Image (cartoon, rainbow, N blue to C red):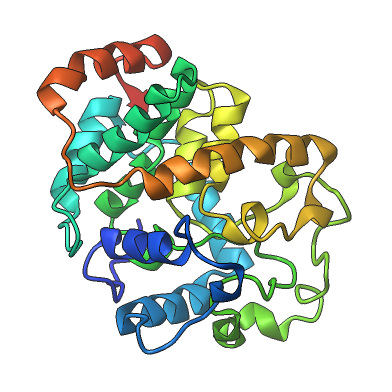
Amino acid sequence: MGTTTNGPLESLDQWDDDVRARYRADRKKDEFRVYDDSTPQVVRDFYKQNHALQTLEFARGKRAEYESRQKAEMGIWEAMERLNTLVDDSDPDTDLSQIEHNLQTSEAIRADGHPRWFQLTGFIHDLGKVLTMWGEPQWAVVGDTFPVGCRWSDKIVYPEFFSANPDSQNAELMSRYGVYSEQCGLENVNLSWGHDEYLYHITKDYVPEPAQYMIRYHSWYSAHREMDYQYLMSDHDMEMMEWVRKFNPYDLYSKSAVKPDLATLRPYYEDLVAEFFPAKIKW
C-alpha cells in the first residue's frame, strides 16, 4: 500500500506549470536555475519534501512494489478518464483536463508528421500519475527525477534540499558513481520514484524502445536538458536520449488555451491505442 501522506501541492498540475515556466522555449541561458520571490512557496515546499524522502531504499522498494503490475487491470482510456477525476486543475492559465493536455501534446506531434508510435507516446506519457489512485503522495508521483544511490548533481532543481535526505550521510552513496560504475547503463541505475518510472514498467512490453526512453526519462531534466550524468550512460543510452530531447518540447510547449475537440479526435486515438495495446493491461 502507498503512503497516504499528502504533498504540499494543491494539484499535480501545479508542478507541471512550474516546469513549463522553468524550461520555457524563449528562456535566456542566464535565466536558468534562478529562483526568487516569484517561485511559489508550494513548489519550494514540494521539492523540500521530494529531495528529503526520495532515497535509494525508497526508490527500490516502490519499483519492487509496482513493477509486478498487480494493482489493477484497465485499459488506456479508462486510466485516462480516472486520472481526470483524480486531479483537480488549479492551473491559472487554462482549464484543460488531463486528457486535453495529452491530446494537445500528441496533436502537436502528429501535426509535425511524426510516426504513430511517437503520437501515442505523447498521448499516454503522463498516465503514470494514476499512482495517486493507490494513495501515493505527490512527492512520489511528480517532480524532476534524478538518480538515487550516487552523488546528486548540482544541476538538479534545489540541490540544497538534499541535505535533509538520509542518503547524504552515507559516504558510499555520495561518491560520483555511488553503487554504480562508469557507463554502467541506465538499465542498472535507480531513478527517484514517480510517474515516469511507473508508466515505463506498465507500457514497456507494448511500445518501441525510443518511446520507452521518452516515457521513462522525460522528467529527468538534469540529464536531457542540462546534459549531466552522461558518465552513467552507455553509448546506446546517449543515442536514445536524443529521442527524449526530441519529445520534450512537445510536452512543454504544446499547451494553449484552445481546447482539443475530444469528440472529433477520440476515434483516431481509440484506433491508435488499439494498434499498440490490448483492451485491458495490468497496472
Q: Looking at the image, is 243 positioned above or below residue 248?
A: above
Kindly tell me whether residue 75 is visible in this rendering.
yes
Left or right: 210 in relation to 262: right
- Give the vertical position of 39 relative to 91 (above or below): below
Location of the N terminus by quadrant is: bottom left
Image check: 254 left or right of 152?
left
The residue lying toward the viewer, choosing from 222 and 177, is 222
Tell me the quarter of the picture where residue 143 sits: bottom left
Q: Position of residue 142 (x, y in %)?
A: 40, 59
- Name which quarter of the figure residue 31 lies in: bottom right
Q: Is residue 94 left or right of residue 55?
A: left
Q: How many marks?
A: 0
Q: Residue furthest right?
A: 182
Residue at left 62%, top 26%?
A: 209
Whether residue 137 is visible: no
Quarter of the image that includes the C terminus: top left
Report the front residue among 140 and 261: 261
In the image, 108 versus 170, the foreground residue is: 108
Relative to residue 238, is residue 155 drawn left or right? left
Specify the farthest residue to the left.
Answer: 263
Q: Residue at x 24, y 35 (%)?
A: 80
Front position in the image: 210 or 29: 29
At 63% from the left and 61% from the top, the residue drawn is: 222
The residue at the point 79 percent across, 34 percent down is 236
Above or below, comparing residue 255 to residue 182 in the picture? above
Residue 34, given in percent of the width and then of the height, sits at: 52, 80
Q: Residue 121 location, x and y as percent?
A: 44, 30
Q: Position of residue 75 (x, y in %)?
A: 28, 24
